Amino acid sequence: MRPWNFSAGPSALPLEVLQQAAAELTDWHGCGMSVMEMSHRGVQFTQIRDEAVADLRSLLSIPDEFEVLFMQGGATAENAIVPLNLIGRRSAGKADYVLTGIWSNKSYAEAQRYGDIAVAATSGQEKVIDGVAQAPWTWYPDAGEWKPRRDAAYLHICGNETIGGLECAAWPSMASLGAPDVPLVVDVSSHFLSRPIDFSKVGMVYAGAQKNAGPAGVTVVIVRKDLIGHALPACPSAFNYSNVAAAGSMFNTPPTFAIYIAGLVFKWLRRQGGIEAIEQANIAKAKALYSFLDQSGFYVSRVQRSARSRMNVPFFLRDESLNARFLEEAQAAGLLQLRGHKSVGGMRASIYNAVPMEAVQALINYLQDFERRHG
Ligand SMILES: *Cc1c(COP(=O)(O)O)cnc(C)c1O
């Protein structure tokens, strides 16, 4: 059996998808070419692109007033591409950011180059929540406390902080924050396709595919049509949403193989019963793992309970001198890539869509066994 892979990204893909890609690798559907070898403008790849867009639209019930774009540069490039495209839609040249951890801070820092950028809320200080003193970046500010400027071009949040293991439980409507003309822009990289998206609440979402949607190399952007067409003159043509939309994500050669694999993941998700079904599975997996950690005196989760991510579960051994041993024995037991991010330390189990309950159960069994032997 293959080991279980808990990597934060690039991360596990569904085995069925890998097997199908392997079977089709040298000859896609009898055309005599690999997807890697075919013209992106030919009939075969056009079909692959069209099906990927259609399957994604169907999975997430994306309304017609949104464009679906396949881009490059990852979420990191979007940190610049978003302000380059959106900040010019209002004359003030302002954008606001909610800071909740490493990724949102990177977005905020990059945006500084393009306008008047402000912090609408931050969890960068300690806060007592439900009687627990939460360290900086281990809690998510309540939407009711975000302070967007009414004339900002957009408000940016990170929906799921992959490193800290924090997820925004529910996105507010911007009207309820007194800023109805400020669209919400969400970096959904690490929880894209793990749960439904309420498109009535957002202007745009974007995701690097390599966490939960496919391989590295393609970035999915879903943006409301009325928000595009205001790019700054400095915006590179290949990163201008208008150009990319007008060209059906083929303004230049797209990352064809990555789009193809993401398309196979979309079809796999449809076979699993769609987003509602995968969300239920994700809820069950997260519940099993957090419940185990909570009853244990040997391990500890330090994230605010109501903001715990369903996708990325950082945890610590109370005796950190056992860390190296824990990881070695985990690997020997067929549980890969559990080391926490260097900025947080400890462990992190990423339990994306392609990581089944069976894997989470295997992890819990290992945690129990390790505790029994070393506790
Ligand atoms: C991984 C990640 C990024 C960075 O993605 P790249 O594809 O490496 O640019 C940004 N935001 C979030 C939430 C991430 O998980």
Image: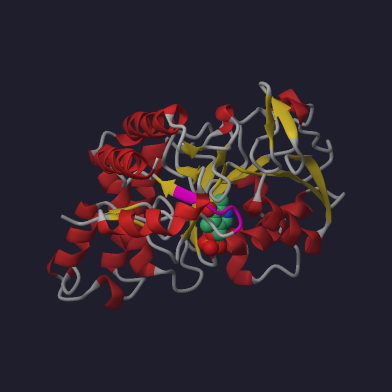
Q: Quadrant of residue 216?
A: bottom left
Task: Specify the quadrant of the image occupied by residue 113.
Answer: bottom right
Q: Is residue 127 above or below residue 212?
A: above
Coordinates of residue 175 in the picture (x, y in percent): 72, 26
Left or right: 357, with 88 as reference point: left
The verdict on residue 339 being magenta is no
**Magenta includes 345?**
yes
**How far from the left and from the top, in percent, is residue 296?**
43, 31
Residue 56 at what x, y percent from top left? Answer: 38, 45
Q: Position of residue 257 (x, y in %)?
A: 34, 68
In terms of depth relative to the viewer, which is nearer, 53 or 18? 18
Magenta span: 343-348
Question: 351 or 125, which lies in front?
Answer: 125
Q: Nearer the viewer, residue 165 or 32?
A: 165
Residue 72 placement, left or right of 269: right
Q: Residue at x 74, y 32 (%)?
A: 127
Quarter of the picture containing the N terminus is bottom left
- View extreme (front): residue: 374
In which quadrant of the rendered view does residue 358 lie?
top left
Magenta-highlighted stretch: main secondary structure?
loop
Specify how the rendered protein is coloured.
secondary structure
Most extreme residue toward the bottom is 37
Residue at 83%, 57% (x, y): give it. 115
Question: Which of these two is toward me, 135 or 139?
Answer: 135
Residue 360 seen in this snapshot:
yes
* Quadrant (top left/top right/bottom left/bottom right) for the C terminus: top left
As displayed, is residue 98 above or below residue 320?
above
